[in-house]
Image: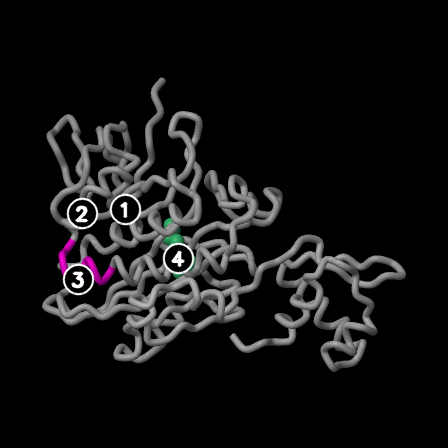
């Protein structure tokens, strides 16, 4: 992400004091009309810019933009060496799509972060709400020499890697709802979604193949009035419990954790993650229903299979689901 006009404008406005149109024009080397036009663009992006009569403009709340230097500093040398490129974008349709547009050969080690996504992709064809400069939208491309079937557990690895990064950021109690929803809160009082992962794999059954691992984490959502209109399930963000959270810090930890975890998965397989999965698994022992192939199946979740499928104890015996949408059935 080069220093676009909007980035520089936010940087100048971030200080908290009001800035007159004249001083903004002088600072950024443009006309007052251009300042006015760009303030309008920031507002269109959802940034709340207050105009104070006789004083000028200021941001309603501070915004932390993605910062290449800070992110690079937060990534360990081992993970940095595994990256081929760290690409920061101001706006993109989807960070996963951005990687998929690259030549297959160039995708390995390409990490993409964006300030916003216009068509963020969620699982099962849903949209991922991706407002400007508030959350983390990250994708990492990775080439595997093995075939697609060997990567069945990769979505679970990405969820565990995300929990590790969250834990290092101060969010220690994140649970995973199979296969890779990142959840916070008490199941009985109400679980809320903090983030999600979307792993898309292209390649041959016998290999090699290229995976794009996408993770979205809610860091500092807009007001509930705005967010509730965009998301149709209970949601939460990190700032609700850790107000000082830094997006750059989390982005760096996420890249670090993903790169290390995927290297470990390549070398040792999913066995290296099984214990941690069991500790983070929010479903085991719960009565759940699984929507799979347009059919609803009820039973008690009882862990995962060798290949990462959800095991469900039903009246007809134990069944394995390799895909599906799980909802927890509350007692009573
Ligand atoms: C889910 O539905 O839970 C998965 C959400 C995945 C969202 C992330 S944001 C970064 C990456 N780019 C996308 O378009 N989607 C993923």
Numbered range of the magenta stretch: 262-269
Kindly indicate whether the residue at mark 1 contacts the one at mark 2 (C-beta within 8 angstroms): yes
The answer to whether residue 295 is left or right of residue 241 is left
- The secondary structure type at the circle numbered 4 is helix
Q: Residue at x 16, y 52 (%)?
A: 270
Q: CA distance from mark 2 to mark 3?
A: 16 Å
Mark 3: C-beta under 8 Å from nearest atom of ligand 1: no
Residue 266, numbered circle: 3
The answer to whether residue 88 is left or right of residue 17 is left
Q: What is the quadrant of the C terminus in the image? A: top left
Packing grade of label 4 (10 A; few <14, some 14-19, many >=20) is many
Packing grade of label 1 (10 A; few <14, some 14-19, many >=20) is many
Among numbered discs 4 and 2, the one appearing first in the sequence: 4
Q: Which residue is mark 1?
A: 179
Residue 253, numbered circle: 4
Q: CA distance from mark 2 to mark 1?
A: 8 Å
Q: Residue at x 15, y 26 (%)?
A: 315
Q: Nearer the viewer, residue 283 or 290?
A: 283
Marks 1, 4: nearer the viewer: 4
The answer to whether residue 16 is left or right of residue 100 is right
Q: Residue at x 39, y 57 (%)?
A: 253
Q: Is residue 175 positioned above or below 267 on the image?
A: above
Q: CA distance from mark 4 to mark 2?
A: 25 Å
């Amino acid at each position: 992400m080069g220093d676009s006009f909007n980035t520089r404008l936010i940087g100048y406005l971030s200080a908290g004091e009001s800035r007159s149109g004249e001083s903004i024009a002088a600072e950024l080397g443009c006309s007052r009309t251009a300042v006015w036009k760009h303030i309008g663009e920031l507002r269109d992006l959802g940034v709340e810019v207050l105009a104070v009569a006789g004083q000028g403009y200021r941001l309603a709340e501070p915004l932390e933009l993605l910062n290449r230097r800070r992110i690079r500093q937060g990534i360990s040398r081992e993970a940095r060496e595994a990256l081929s490129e760290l690409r920061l974008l101001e706006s993109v349709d989807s960070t996963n799509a951005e990687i998929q547009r690259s030549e297959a050969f160039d995708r390995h080690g390409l990490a993409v972060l964006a300030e916003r996504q216009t068509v963020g992709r969620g699982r099962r064809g849903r949209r991922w709400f991706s407002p400007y400069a508030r959350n983390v939208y990250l994708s990492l491309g990775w080439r595997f020499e093995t075939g697609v079937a060997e990567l069945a557990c990769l979505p679970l690895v990405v969820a565990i890697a995300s929990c590790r990064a969250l834990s290092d950021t101060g969010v220690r109690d994140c649970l995973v709802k199979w296969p890779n929803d990142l959840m916070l809160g008490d199941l009985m009082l109400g679980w809320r979604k903090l983030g999600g992962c979307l792993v898309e794999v292209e390649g041959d059954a016998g290999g090699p193949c290229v995976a794009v691992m996408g993770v979205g984490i809610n860091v500092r959502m807009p007001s509930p009035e705005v967010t509730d209109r965009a998301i149709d399930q209970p949601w939460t963000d990190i700032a609700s419990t850790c107000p000082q959270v830094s997006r750059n810090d989390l982005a760096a930890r996420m890249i670090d954790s993903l790169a290390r975890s995927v290297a470990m998965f390549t070398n040792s397989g999913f066995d290296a993650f099984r214990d941690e999965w069991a500790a983070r698994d929010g479903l085991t022992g719960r009565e759940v229903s699984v929507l799979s192939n347009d059919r609803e199946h009820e039973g008690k979740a009882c862990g995962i299979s060798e290949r990462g499928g959800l095991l469900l104890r039903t009246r007809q015996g134990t069944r394995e689901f390799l895909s599906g949408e799980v909802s927890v059935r509350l007692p009573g």
